[in-house]
Amino acid sequence: MLVLASIVVAAWVYLAVAHGRFWQSGPELPHHVTPLRMARVAVVIPARDEAEHIEHTLCALLQQDYRWPFRVILVDDNSTDGTGDIARDLAAEDPRLTVVQGQPLPAGWTGKMWAVSQGLEYAPEADYVLLTDADIVHASSHVAQLVAAAQAGNYDLVSEMVRLRCKTLPERFAIPAFVFFFAMLYPFARVADKRSKVAAAAGGTMLLSQAALQRIDGVSRIRAELIDDCALAREVKRGGYATWLGHATRATSLRKYPHFADIWQMIARTAYVQLQYSPLLLLGTVAGMLLLYAVPLALALHTRGITMWCGAATWVLMAALFQPILRRYQQPPLWGMALPLIAMFYMAATIGSAIRFYRGKGGQWKNRTYPAT
């Protein structure tokens, strides 16, 4: 038992001091900056059944305080709820908005990547392309901020983890932990390090240079990817281009998760994809999450002596590392002590993702089911 306690203590000490400072509530792009030189920007938005959010998203983009050529391209991916009609009404009032009617989905493509590919065809003249989602609201200075950062740092991909909605109990339970776990998988400092192989992006905000897009053939290489943002980042970084990933202060998601079932669906949709549909990786993930989160709690509550203190100290350490993200989402510090329980929820949803896959229901999104690739 003491050996097990020593292992979990060592694991969390390593994560705290040597894993790319993943637990920090940063980095963030500087505010009040302007682009160093003229840059034409095109925003590409794939949208399928997003009538609830699309007007807010488009209006925020059309109100950007950006002095250089700027346009917005929305690809209506065969929506059935009037998303395209709302966008076309706005386009009639602002010529900077182009609404593209999506073509039928060809074999071998995911719906989102096919929509993005069609949108990119309308942006060949842009120096930078901003890929964003239909539920993201951007502050008026955000596009200028992204372009300024890309130019100042000579980055070909600037991406941000947008501020996710965190109001309902399920959201407060799971959303800060989602950001924490994502940063643990892809430490932001290592994403920006050219010497590191870690590559990641967050799909809500991805500003790409035209040079990088042309070098990697747009999104054709990742046409079948369900976790498309990280796949795109891998292609960009593999090409030798510089990338940056941080936390957004000027972009917010409107996507709601009112029920625990919605959170479960969010995780289960791509968790087994992340594990490459591998039973061995699934077993390793389950074992790792039990070791990191369940074992310290069990040691603290069900043993005595030094093993109890090791478990308690580890539990407190993980809660402390969680605090910067909790503060970012304005959540009480005590949520940190619930991290083992939250992790078990994520572990169960990951197992559920595998079960869904083997039942032929994996990779479902927007009423489409995608095969394993």
Image: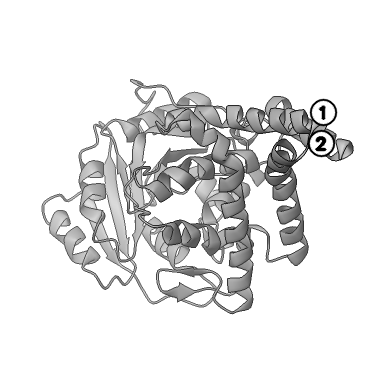
108 shown above or below 302 = below
How many residues crowd around disc 1 within 10 Å: few (fewer than 14), some, or many (20 or more)?
Answer: some
Q: Nearer the viewer, mark 2 or mark 1?
A: 1
> Measured from the top left, where is residue 293 in percent x and y?
68, 43
Residue 354 percent location from the top left of the image: 63, 68
- Residue shown at 72% from the left, 49% from the top: 290
In depth, the one of 239 and 7 nearer the eye is: 7
Mark 2 vs 1, N-terminal side = 2
Task: Pinpoint residue 59: horizontal percent, then vertical percent.
Answer: 20, 46
Residue topped by disc 1: 306
Q: Is residue 175 left or right of residue 196?
A: left
Label 2 – label 1 distance at C-alpha? 9 Å
Quickly name the residue at label 2: 5
Q: Are marks 2 and 1 in contact (CB under 8 Å)?
A: yes
* Front-lying residue, 85 or 153: 85
Measured along the vertical axis of the image, is residue 76 above or below residue 347?
below
